[in-house]
């Protein structure tokens, strides 16, 4: 594959609490145009904070204590908890139209039209296009699709996905992953995909960074990293992906 000029470069990023307790240390990676990078690692390893730093939206009490984030690209985030990211008191189509209105700087009527097109693009049913459909009337998978539509309404160069499928059952998880892959092919955005699920990251991303306790313990091309892990923690993640047991009588009769 031809190497592209990075649209995002993170160099020795460190994050700490305002009382100087280190949370993320010395994280470096780069992302090319249209490329997908997976950030995998255990709970509390600093994945979400790293994404928030890229977005420029660190939570209260956390600050950048070192390093540089270089990018001229726009990014939008798909948050970990889709239902929490939606306003329960506003119909979904209106919420989406509002994001289009402010981010794409088009008129009210055009915003609504684009919002309806986005809902369709995400494979949401016709019924959700009505102005009386609230988030509480949607399934978890539908909420996640709306939240992805909202991020895409910002026309980002980089889509930051924070465990977008963790709360969903495995069949819906798969559908959402397939939808994200299709949209990435259609729209060409780059992606940083955070998950604790190595199998999902390996399926989606050409490069992986493995995080543990606020540091990247290993990074590289996905295939290389899976076949030849150099860090014991990466090996442990690989070993913890359970293979399906062989089916009885699966041999040709
Ligand atoms: N606002 C905050 N103030 C202080 N510490 C925080 C804050 N937000 C996160 N942390 C700490 O920073 C560390 C990294 O948190 P982060 O949310 O990035 O983890 P994560 O890898 O996304 O975990 P998970 O997989 O559970 O979502 C954790 O130890 C967490 O307790
Ligand atoms: Mg997180």
Image (cartoon, grey):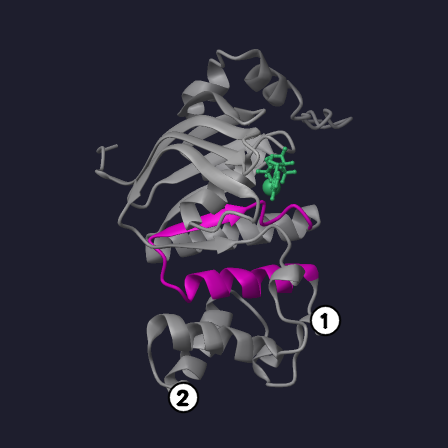
Q: Is residue 51 shown in magenta?
A: no
Location of the C terminus (image quadrant): top right
Q: Is residue 153 shown in magenta?
A: yes
SS state under label 1: helix
Q: Is residue 175 left or right of residue 179?
A: right
Q: Earlier in the sequence, mark 2 or mark 1?
A: 2
Across and down, in percent, residue 236 comes to 63, 17
Q: CA distance from mark 2 to mark 1?
A: 25 Å
Residue on which the image places disc 1: 136
Residue on which the image places disc 2: 109
Q: Which residue occupies 43% across, 62% down?
A: 152
**In the depicted structure, whether residue 49 falls above or below residue 124:** above
**Residue range of the region highlighted in magenta in the rendering:** 140-167
Q: Is residue 160 left or right of residue 29?
A: right
The answer to whether one can see residue 31 in this image is no
The answer to whether one can see residue 114 in this image is yes
Across and down, in percent, residue 148 comes to 51, 60
């Amino acid at each position: 594959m031809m190497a592209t000029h990075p649209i995002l470069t993170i160099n020795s990023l460190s994050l700490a609490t305002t009382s100087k307790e280190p949370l993320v240390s010395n994280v470096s990676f780069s992302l090319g145009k249209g490329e997908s990078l997976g950030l995998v690692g255990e709970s509390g390893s600093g994945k979400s904070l790293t994404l928030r730093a890229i977005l420029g939206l660190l939570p209260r009490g956390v600050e950048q204590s070192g390093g540089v984030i270089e990018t001229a690209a726009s990014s939008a985030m798909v948050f970990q908890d889709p239902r929490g990211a939606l306003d329960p008191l506003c119909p979904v189509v209106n919420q989406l139209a509002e994001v289009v209105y402010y981010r794409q700087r088009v008129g009210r009527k055009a915003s609504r039209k684009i919002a309806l097109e986005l809902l369709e693009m995400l494979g949401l049913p016709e019924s959700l296009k009505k102005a009386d459909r609230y988030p509480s009337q949607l399934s978890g998978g539908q909420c996640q699709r709306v939240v992805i539509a909202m991020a895409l309404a910002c026309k980002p160069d980089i889509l930051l996905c924070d465990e977008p499928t963790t709360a969903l059952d495995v069949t819906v998880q798969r559908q959402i992953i397939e939808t994200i892959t299709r949209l990435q092919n259609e729209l060409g955005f780059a992606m940083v995909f955070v998950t604790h699920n190595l199998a999902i990251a390996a399926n989606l991303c050409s490069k992986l960074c493995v995080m543990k306790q606020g540091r990247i313990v290993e990074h590289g091309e996905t295939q290389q990293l899976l076949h030849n892990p150099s860090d014991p923690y990466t090996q442990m993640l690989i070993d913890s992906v359970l293979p399906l047991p062989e089916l009885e009588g699966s041999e040709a009769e």
